[in-house]
Image: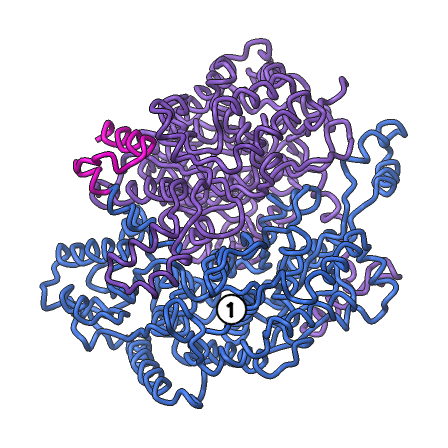
Chain colours: A blue, B purple
Amino acid sequence: MPATPVLSQLPSYEVIKTIAQSLKAVSVVRMLEQEPNRAAEFTLTAAGLQLDYSKHLLDVQARQALLQLAEEAKLPAAIAGLLAGEELNNTEQRPALHTLLRASSGGSLGSKFDEVVAARASMRQWADQLNAGELRGFSGSVITDVVNIGIGGSDLGPRLVTEALRPFHGSVACHYVANVDPADLQNTLLNLQAETTLFILCSKSFRTEETLTNSLVAREWMKQSGATDADLNKHFVAITSNLQAAADFGIPEKNCLPLWDWVGGRYSVWSAIGLSCAIAIGWENFELFLAGAAAMDEHFQSAPLAENMPVMMSLLEVWYVNFFGANNHVVLPYDHSLQKLPDFLQQLTMESNGKRVNKSGVLLDYHTGPVLWGSAGTMGQHSFHQLLHQGTQQCPADFILPLTTHTGMTEQHRRLVANCIAQSRTMTVGRSIDEAKSSLLERGMDEASAGELAPHLSMPGNRPNSVITMASLAPQTLGALLALYEHRTFCSAVLWGINPFDQWGVELGKEIGVQVLGLMAGESSSGSMDTATERLIGEWLAEQ
Amino acid sequence: MPATPVLSQLPSYEVIKTIAQSLKAVSVVRMLEQEPNRAAEFTLTAAGLQLDYSKHLLDVQARQALLQLAEEAKLPAAIAGLLAGEELNNTEQRPALHTLLRASSGGSLGSKFDEVVAARASMRQWADQLNAGELRGFSGSVITDVVNIGIGGSDLGPRLVTEALRPFHGSVACHYVANVDPADLQNTLLNLQAETTLFILCSKSFRTEETLTNSLVAREWMKQSGATDADLNKHFVAITSNLQAAADFGIPEKNCLPLWDWVGGRYSVWSAIGLSCAIAIGWENFELFLAGAAAMDEHFQSAPLAENMPVMMSLLEVWYVNFFGANNHVVLPYDHSLQKLPDFLQQLTMESNGKRVNKSGVLLDYHTGPVLWGSAGTMGQHSFHQLLHQGTQQCPADFILPLTTHTGMTEQHRRLVANCIAQSRTMTVGRSIDEAKSSLLERGMDEASAGELAPHLSMPGNRPNSVITMASLAPQTLGALLALYEHRTFCSAVLWGINPFDQWGVELGKEIGVQVLGLMAGESSSGSMDTATERLIGEWLAEQ
């Protein structure tokens, strides 16, 4: 493997440090005033999305230096390598082919693409039959409800798409169960009838603890509701690469859809893992969802770095993490249907880039992936926006704004849009103590009180944020949006020198989980556990 | 007003900086080995909760220094002042009396307590009548569903309590609508019948934009479903201090429950704002919820600092924010019913402590409130735990663990408990490169490959975390838990010298929102807006 470029050793790194230092006290408002074309020049378009990044602590020189950094980190070659199916996941010796899942042709990856096409045909069959009311359960009644059992990437993606595209739903209701906490499945089953419910079990290995535990409970529920063993194939589908384990569970091969080792969980909504959302929105809409992502792939592949939306968003991420000390990033979708987007992006970005060694295993001397968090606007305005505006922490923000609504309630939606635009502006312009004082005096407050209160109303402004807009939230634009963040995540990984496609950090917790479960069942620890863990297990035992 | 203590000028501040420096390379595992009683000694009990803080980068000397800092910041006097009803919200000239809302006697605050008692009686009447099926809608049918319309503090608290205490629900289903996005209300009304639905409108001022907008849509829906103006009093209740505005909306005084200016939104679930959750769980359970919080208040008031659970949690917050550079805090409830807890705590902590000036208006030279985020375990294990274990960011964590389940599914719950305890241990112990390599060799990997892969499996450990346990998630323990975080938030505010009870930082966004709405309606900006905002408005206009 060629040596991994190390960000802090790239020629431009020190240059950018100096530039960043000079921009820490910049006024974005002044830059917008002095550069009449800034708003337009710092806006990019791709696959139905617009990115306005004009309100960042960034000038043309800084942007140029960051683009130079991307060249030095060999980002163009990495992008080409990703899309050509090179073995970029070096610690697992695999390519990462999520872009192939939404491609319309296979190029040099023809044989793998044939498998993708076959899987799509199988997904389409299930989706079409269900939406046509042609699938029946053990009692002969038509299947009306689908429950997706999966966790992490086998849950967050399809769940998000199903929620986000509610106006496109057909007749089948799709539900999601992920947590091993029995309350999750129990609450879902409360409102369902076994005879009209189909379970989709999503687990590449068919060994995921939570999914298997929930699947067993679901099977038991089905049997107690009157299904025989022979009926199970009317109620269970598996998305897995472990056909044997699925068969042992009682799911025949004809009810299994494939997964491949070159699809990571957090990049899998485009694969058969997306079956539940394909059912929810219907196959044609799911194809539009794939096409939207493919359009972003095409942009990512062909646009020059300076006009490349995922690249620019990634450079901004590195800019704040490595040169401004930010260690979090907030995502604020101003669309209630996107309220699960931060959850999805948490997995995508934090599981991909929450790493401390580079691809060659060398411990890094700089920060990598930040904490990603957020919630649907306007909810956050009545919650954490206080800290965004007046806190001491740096929280670079992405506002995401569909410009029209499917609800038909345009007046209400207009207020939502106004709030989004206003919050972005507020973060940028801030308010000086003098301005705050004037405003208080105008409201009739006396001089002394206004002087005392004004510092509490003042806000620094210059809080960096992007606004991503789209004409409407539709299958294509949602596909493009998710692909945008996938590629942004990949670019940041390349800049940091890390492998975004493995997740070795979750292994140890699983091993220790098995040990703890043993101790809870009465096995002796023989000193293998720390005293704090032993005390906690004792506390649990005392309540049983 | 007496001068506000400034954290960075307190005598112990520099001492603690030195101590913290020495603890940055400490091994928590070694401390647990060398101090056999550490697990027990670093555990506190209060109001049915246990806090295990033995896995922090903290020794006895550091703890002692932090307690000394608390004394220097006059924390004991501040605690006493809060509970005695002193005017601690200095920028709004009000006390903060949320503890009075759950008190069983009024002490020196007798007249205010009388109002609380009267409001409780009114809440009880509504809750009892609804649960007894005695309230009927315009058609004569019994009311079966309640929709709470509120946002921020008028939403997050009652929503959390309703979800968390599902096993305690009676016959009335409670729903929550907050977002001004029409999709929120529309999705909720889809499954409801107007004639059997009661709306509770929560807005202290009766002017909150989102709540008013949604309320008008709800009223229109009610009328279109057949209700006359005279019927509205059967379907609308208001929690407000603006009786006139409620009357203008069509809600008579007998349908209004009071709020007072000494109850902040994020501290209001204990007031009439909690009516919806009191209905959901029934009055007796709501009283137990209040009693749980009151038990935590009693502990907070009477326990010495060293044994005071909210105080210790707050000292740990300051410890990491100000001495270790952490700027976020992750909350991980291992109970699916608590999945909304991070949202609730986001408002509580970030709106309270996302401030950059102290109570006297002086700009601070140190960090205050961190970003709070999180999700229900085990979901996060398949998402962001990768970063918790192997990322470069410091994310102090609170695990929250009920030791038993209401679901009856003990085997599944046992796995949930094991996962929680294991994740806490994993963050602490980590895994060295050598250990990782041995583990790979044991699995049959060859020497060279194991050597190459081991750095990717290694984890630093020493990632600080607390574990908060309770026998079960019940009204009392939930009340105690929320009061615990309220008081933790207050203590941190005292240490940072800030006022946790105002939120001036959200004002400007509202003002700019009105201006943007005007421009969207065609008003001329006359140069009042920046060009980026004008461009965004133009983009929106182009889609209309």
Up/down of A231 relative to B100, above or below:
below
Q: Secondary structure at mark 1?
A: helix
Please indicate, yes or no, whether residue B199 appears anywhere in the rendered image.
no
Q: Is residue B389 magenta?
A: no
Residue at 26% x, 38% y is: A528
Q: Nearer the viewer, residue B327 or B468?
A: B327
| Residue type, numbered disc 1 | Glu
Label 1 crowd bin: few (<14), some (14–19), many (20+), radius 10 Å: many
Up/down of A131 relative to B376, above or below:
below
Q: Nearer the viewer, residue A288 or B59?
A: B59
Q: Nearer the viewer, residue B217 or B34?
A: B34
Residue at 21% x, 41% y is: B410
Q: Nearer the viewer, residue B156 or B469?
A: B469
Where the C terminus of chain B falls, by quadrant? bottom right
Image location of residue B275, percent across then percent down:
48, 33
User: What is the magenta range?
Assistant: A517-544
Residue at 62% x, 49% y is: B210
Please indicate, yes or no, whether residue B212 appears anywhere in the rendered image.
yes
Image location of residue B223, percent across then percent down:
53, 52
Q: Would you name the residue on which mark 1 appears?
A: A486
Up/down of A60 relative to B472, above or below:
below
Q: Quadrant of residue B281?
A: top left
Where the N terminus of chain B falls, by quadrant? top right
Image location of residue B446, percent across then percent down:
28, 65
Chain letter for the residue marked with disc 1 in the picture: A
Image location of residue B227, percent across then percent down:
50, 50
Residue at 43% x, 26% y is: B480
Q: Is residue A523 magenta?
A: yes
Q: Residue furthest top?
A: B108
